[in-house]
Image: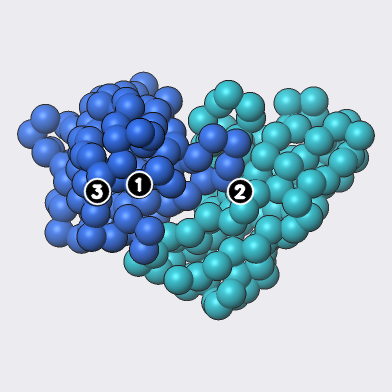
Chain colours: A cyan, B blue
Amino acid sequence: EIVLTQSPGTLSLSPGERATLSCRASQSVSSSYLAWYQQKPGQVPRLLIYGASSRATGIPDRFSGSGSGTDFTLTISRLEPEDFAVYYCQQYGSSSLTFGGGTKVEIK
Amino acid sequence: EVQLLESGGGLVQPGGSLRLSCAASGFTFSSSAMSWVRQAPGKGLEWVSVISNGAGSTYYADSVKGRFTISRDNSKNTLYLQMNTLRVEDTAVYYCAKNRGSGTYSPLDYWGQGTLVTVSS
């Protein structure tokens, strides 16, 4: 099973700032099958990024994903008030799909 | 509009069983793999199981392997999760999710609202 470790656990930033979230895999993620999801309190998760760098339908271009192998990054270029949430990475390149533990982006 | 509506959650004693259902609409159900993901209260997401579009491939998290069974009825546009030998640690909101592709190696692009399963004596 591929273990995904997200860092930091919590990121305290102000609106307008840049957010950089990390997701590290215990072994290489096949074909960059890495996705990012956003979850706000009381809401269901929403797919943001798939294939490590492709934005899902309707996702603003301030969200971008990068990386390959074992190291992946989600970047939010300028935080909007609605971006404060928990973000999860997920790998789907093996028969045992796994999520990371999440990074909470909170208002500073 | 894609809609996923879970049902079947509730309170069950340890060792008991439940069957969750997920009624799908707004897309070609038989063309999409489907998944179950759970979230314990105040915790992160945990992938549970996935089934390919034609049910030829199924996979499970180690934590539920041998106890849970995923299945689907493409004629009814419905996904199922049979949960046996339930444990206290299975307590969670269970989400039904649509995979973006027909195979199991695909991300989850739509999620249901979830159904709460509570395992307690």
Tell me the residue at 65%/44% (across/down).
Answer: A87
Which residue is the site of mark 2? A88
User: Is disc 2 on the same chain as disc 1?
Assistant: no
Amino acid type, callout 2: Tyr
Q: Is residue A51 left or right of residue B23?
A: right
Residue A19 sits above or below residue B22 on the image? below
**Callout 3: SS:** loop
Chain for disc number 3: B
Q: CA distance from mark 3 to mark 1?
A: 7 Å
Residue B113 spot, x, y in % from top left: 42, 25
Q: Quadrant of residue A8?
A: bottom right
Residue A108 sits above or below residue B85 on the image? above
Tell me the residue at 47%/49% (across/down).
Answer: B46
Residue B18 spot, x, y in % from top left: 22, 35
- For the residues bearing labels 1 and 2, Cβ distance under 8 angstroms: no
**Callout 2: SS:** strand
Amino acid type, callout 1: Arg
Amino acid type, callout 3: Thr
Q: Quadrant of residue B76?
A: top left
Which residue is the site of mark 1? B87
Q: Is residue A13 left or right of residue B7?
A: right
| Label 1, residues with CA under 10 Å away: few <14, some 14-19, many ≥20 | some
Q: CA distance from mark 3 to mark 2?
A: 29 Å
**Callout 1: SS:** loop
- For the residues bearing labels 3 and 1, Cβ distance under 8 angstroms: yes
Q: Is residue A1 visible?
A: yes
Image depth: mark 1 or mark 2 in front: 1
Q: Is residue B33 left or right of residue A23?
A: left
Which residue is the site of mark 3? B85
Tell me the residue at 55%/77% (across/down).
Answer: A27
